[in-house]
Amino acid sequence: MAHQEVELPNVEELKEQSARQFTRVTALITAFYAVLLAVVALGGNNAAKEVSLSQQRASDQWAFYQAKAIRGHLYHIEAMRIESELGDAVATDAAGLRKTAFLAEMKQQEAHYETEKKEIERQARELEHERDVYRQKDPYFDFGEVLLQIGIVLASLSILTGARPIFWASVAAAVLGAILGFNGYLLLFRLPFL
């Protein structure tokens, strides 16, 4: 009977192959972290821009409101002046009739500006609400970005050292960062310190 020789794998080759596989997998996972980071960073940048834009638009609306309020107040003052000129007497002469018509016009304009002010105020409050929502989202993006960056650094460090515990720490940081980052988009939960 012929004996067949069985070649045992070289332990060093197995270790080297395992290390190469760990490096490849970790590099792919690190690239995935980078993609997540890009998505979270985009959300953070957009949230910051929207906070600023909504604040600016709300301020513009409030300035417009102020202008309407001033115009309405001027019409109110003019109506009061005409009323005091007319007094309790019933206007029968041409001048009195003109003043009565002018008074009616002033009161109509005053009412018109009051109606416009209400709509402008509603729009301004909507913009402030929009600003507040983006302001609430922004910290989740920020912390998500930081944790994803930490995950990338730890994953890179685990490739250099071959230390699997560092790799698992990178996974933990990246998962937490992704959860916080995507919560910035959806606001599914709120953390009391953010």
Image (cartoon, grey):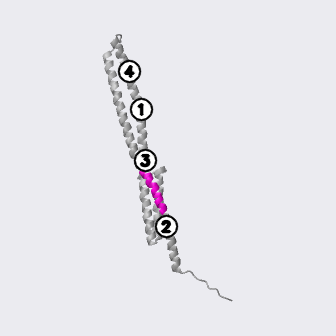
Label 1, secondary structure: give it: helix
Crowding near pointer 4: few (<14 within 10 Å), some, many (20+)?
A: some
Mark 1 or mark 4, whichever is nearer to me:
4
Type of residue at label 4? Answer: Glu
Q: CA distance from mark 2 to mark 4?
A: 77 Å
The kind of residue tagged 1 is Lys
Tag nearer the camera, 4 or 3? 4
Q: Which mark is residue 26?
A: 2
Calculate the distance from the C-alpha at mark 2 to the C-alpha at mark 1: 58 Å
For badge 2, the amino acid type reads Thr
Between the C-alphas of marks 4 and 3, the distance is 44 Å
Seen in the image, is 182 located left or right of residue 8? left
The answer to whether marks 2 and 4 mark residues whose Cβ atoms lie closer than 8 Å is: no
Q: How far, Cα to Cα, is label 3 from label 1? A: 25 Å
Give the amino acid type for the residue marked by disc 3 in the picture. Answer: Tyr
Q: Earlier in the sequence, mark 1 or mark 4?
A: 4
